[in-house]
């Protein structure tokens, strides 16, 4: 478990009532939990506002927002058109209340492992990772791993693959990448971003916390987590072969280069398997999800304004916390797009401040 953060909350109840007038409640992705915990602690000290965020996975955050039991959701997977069409109706807007995707950070999903005695980063390709999770590669000294790592004496040790057992945006980023680099994966397992799949092999754990905890306990294990979870737990972090044939570490610069793409108006962009020669290939946004019209579930205009003000702080002043926790800042077009979406939020059809 991550120890160096002062968490404001621990994943707890599956649903909570909407917060009081001076509190906010969010739930969703575990991917940004270390960052959000730090942000919301600082925000509380600056404003007196308590933001309670439950790390329950992106799928859970999307579900609770659709159920209108939280002020905002957190997700590393963009909601599908089908899910958005199923949002509760807005009387003012005359159809499903749009759910906006506000980019709050971007980060790498890294292969993380427990190999005692191995101090330098192990190299992986997308094909090799897919083969491990397909059950084809089962030993660390398999010739395909050895070929990628000529300077490392890989042990003769079984690979214990771990994966997310809950609805996960981290999974969505990871399997979106695998489907782009492995024809067999795309044919037999999944295509595109999905928060939950039927894994061919391995052991499941809930949350980035669960996967990193499992990897830390089992020598020979391999998992995929948000970069900060591997760093905080002193786990091995792999180097990835990108589409240009370069081995790239998950640095903030490499993640930012991967995200240097034309963004759609709704900010629902994925950019795995980047063609940037220096970009890291398994990276993605984490979004704050919020209804465009805030008059729902008995919410007051004050609560709506507080929600918007908090999210605005997160993607402006709050960005100062990103880099120290291995999350790249949201800047340029991503930040501008997020602010534009925030400006479109209304209460009963009327603009907020």
Image (cartoon, rainbow, N blue to C red):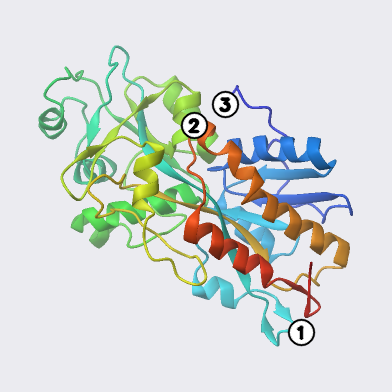
Residue positioned most to the top: 117
Q: Is residue 285 above or below residue 54?
A: below
Q: Nearer the viewer, residue 202 or 238?
A: 238
Residue positioned most to the front: 332
Mark 2 neighbour class, 10 Å CA radius: few under 14, some 14 to 19, many 20 or more: many
> Total label count?
3
Among the two numbered marks 1 and 3 on one chain, the one whose residue lies closer to the N terminus: 3
Residue positioned most to the bottom: 94
Q: Is residue 119 above or below residue 245?
A: above
Q: Identify residue for label 2.
A: 229
Residue 88 coordinates in the image, percent (x, y) = 70, 75
Among the two numbered marks 1 and 2 on one chain, the one whose residue lies closer to the N terminus: 1
Task: Give left or right: position of 329 versus 120.
Answer: right
Residue 204, image quadrant: top left
Determine whether label 3 and label 2 are within 8 Å by CB. yes
Q: CA distance from mark 3 to mark 2?
A: 7 Å
Q: Identify residue for label 1.
A: 92
Mark 3 neighbour class, 10 Å CA radius: few under 14, some 14 to 19, many 20 or more: some
Residue 65 coordinates in the image, percent (x, y) = 68, 62
Residue 132, image quadrant: top left
Dot 3: what SS?
loop
């Amino acid at each position: 478990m991550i120890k160096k953060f002062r968490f404001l909350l621990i994943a707890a109840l599956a649903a909570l009532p909407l917060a009081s007038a001076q509190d906010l409640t969010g739930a969703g992705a575990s991917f940004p939990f270390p960052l959000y915990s730090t942000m919301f602690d600082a925000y509380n000290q600056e404003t007196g506002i308590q933001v309670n965020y439950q790390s329950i996975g992106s799928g859970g955050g999307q579900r609770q927002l659709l159920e209108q039991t939280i002020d905002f959701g957190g997700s590393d997977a963009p909601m599908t058109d089908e899910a958005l069409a199923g949002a509760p109706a807005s009387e003012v807007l005359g159809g499903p209340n749009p759910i906006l995707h506000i980019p709050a950070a971007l980060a790498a999903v890294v292969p993380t492992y427990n190999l005692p005695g191995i101090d330098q980063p192990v190299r992986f390709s997308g094909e090799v990772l897919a083969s491990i999770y397909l059950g084809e590669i089962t030993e660390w000294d398999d010739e395909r791993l050895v070929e990628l790592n000529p300077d490392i004496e890989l042990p003769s040790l079984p690979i214990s693959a771990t994966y997310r057992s809950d609805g996960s945006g981290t999974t969505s980023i990871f399997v979106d990448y695998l489907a782009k680099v492995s024809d067999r994966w795309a044919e037999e397992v999944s295509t595109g971003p999905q928060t939950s799949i039927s894994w061919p092999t391995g052991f499941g754990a809930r949350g980035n916390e669960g996967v990193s905890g499992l990897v830390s306990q089992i020598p020979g294990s391999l998992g995929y987590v948000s970069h900060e979870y591997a760093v905080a737990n002193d786990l091995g972090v792999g180097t990835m072969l990108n589409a240009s044939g370069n081995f790239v570490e998950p640095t903030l610069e490499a993640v930012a280069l991967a995200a240097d793409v034309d963004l759609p108006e709704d900010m629902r962009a994925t950019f795995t398997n980047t063609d940037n020669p220096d970009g890291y290939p398994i990276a993605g946004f984490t979004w704050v999800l919020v209804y465009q019209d805030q008059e729902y579930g008995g919410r007051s205009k004050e609560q709506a304004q507080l929600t918007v003000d908090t999210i605005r702080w997160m993607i402006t002043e709050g960005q100062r916390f990103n880099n120290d926790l291995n999350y790249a800042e949201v800047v340029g077009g991503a930040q501008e797009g997020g602010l534009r979406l925030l400006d479109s939020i209304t209460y009963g059809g009327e603009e907020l401040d």
